[in-house]
Amino acid sequence: MTTAAPAPLLSPTDQVAEPTKRPPGTRIARKKKFSIGRAAAWTYIVGFLLVTVFPFYWIVRTAFSNNYALSTDPSSLLPVGFSFDAFARVLGFASRAEALAAGGSGASLDIPLYLRNSVIYAGSLTAIVVLSSVLAAYAFARLRWKGRNLVFSILLTALMVPGILTLLPNFILVNDLGLINTFAALILPGALFSAFNIFFLRQFMLGLSSEVEEAALIDGAGPLTIMFRITLPMTSGPVVTLSILTFIGTWNDYFWPLLVGNDPSVRPLTLALGVFQQASPQSQPDFAGLMAATLVAAVPMLLLFVIFGKKIVNSIGFSGIK
């Protein structure tokens, strides 16, 4: 009768520990090692955020301060003499006597009128310039016509011309047409042409698939039908992004309205803030009122970023076909 040979003994170094099983869905917590590069990156990010956010915080701090008390402690990080008087002055809820008693300058600021002017100016210019840019980009990207590349090359040279060089010719043209102190003077010079918008949209349209457009063309659809019903929906991401950026840039514009829009009936809010600062009859400017008015002017932009911020970020990696 034969007996089985005993199993060979394994040395501790030859023994292999049986792997422990983990419940599904669990992750191993890995401790990240400290590195100088990671510390430098976080230091840069925190410093950049502080530099970016602190001016806005200082505006809020000044807006909620008493204008008289600001001079007593100008370096305080908290509101000095906390009050809502500055917003009451700016929004027209305080009389002249109450405004002077609260440290105001006595200057008036018709916020509803200037907000209306800014909405008309920024909204109209954005709608016209984006529509014209879409049409031009489609013509350069999808239509075949003689001299297309040459004209596009000439258009690209406009990106090399500083905008400040075109202010004087545009002002002379608007003045000769008798359009000073009208919305047409504010809108028309920059409404029909934007080299960057055309270039941006053209490059995106060149990356779109042309199979759907060719099928629509075979079915008898015209260029405008193809553009508005096929190409434009596929470019909704960049179009929305350009619309938001154009609206914000126009809303914050100051120098061009200063040249052609000094009348209160067309004066945008950014220009009105400068006039409000210069119209102080007293020796001390109304810094609290000015910062409160600045916050009121910034509210529409903050709402745009809250509502469409994700759209702007996602459009960086947009795709033509969903």
Image: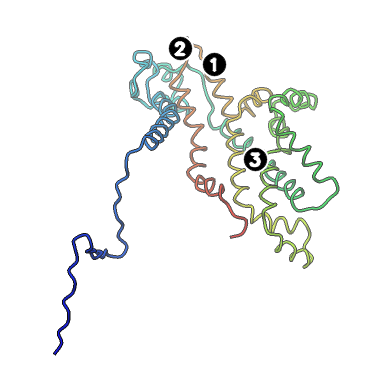
Q: Which residue shows up at 38% across the image and 35% down it?
A: 42
Q: Are marks 2 and 1 in contact (CB under 8 Å)?
A: no
Circle on res. 49? none
The three-letter amino acid code for the residue at tag 3 is Thr
Q: Which label lies toward us, 3 or 2?
A: 3
Q: Position of residue 222 (x, y in %)?
A: 79, 60
Q: Which residue shows up at 60% across the image and 38% down it?
A: 247
- Quadrant of the drawing holding the C terminus: bottom right
Name the N-terminal-most of marks 2 and 1.
1
Circle on res. 279? 1
Looking at this view, is 163 or 279 the one in front? 163
Q: Which residue shows up at 53% across the image and 20% down it?
A: 276
Q: How is the image coloured?
A: rainbow
Real-space CA distance between mark 2 and mark 1, rounded to the nearest whole angstrom: 11 Å
Give the residue number, with chain letter if any, for mark 3: 126
Q: Position of residue 268 (x, y in %)?
A: 60, 29
Up the image or down, 42 lies above or below 139; here it is above
Describe the element under mark 1 as helix, strand or loop.
loop
Q: Position of residue 54 (x, y in %)?
A: 41, 28
Describe the element under mark 3 as helix, strand or loop.
helix
Q: Which label lies toward us, 3 or 1?
A: 3
Circle on res. 284? 2
Q: Which residue shows up at 47% across the image and 9% down it?
A: 283
Name the N-terminal-most of marks 3 and 1.
3
Up the image or down, 16 lies above or below 309; here it is below
Name the N-terminal-most of marks 3 and 2.
3
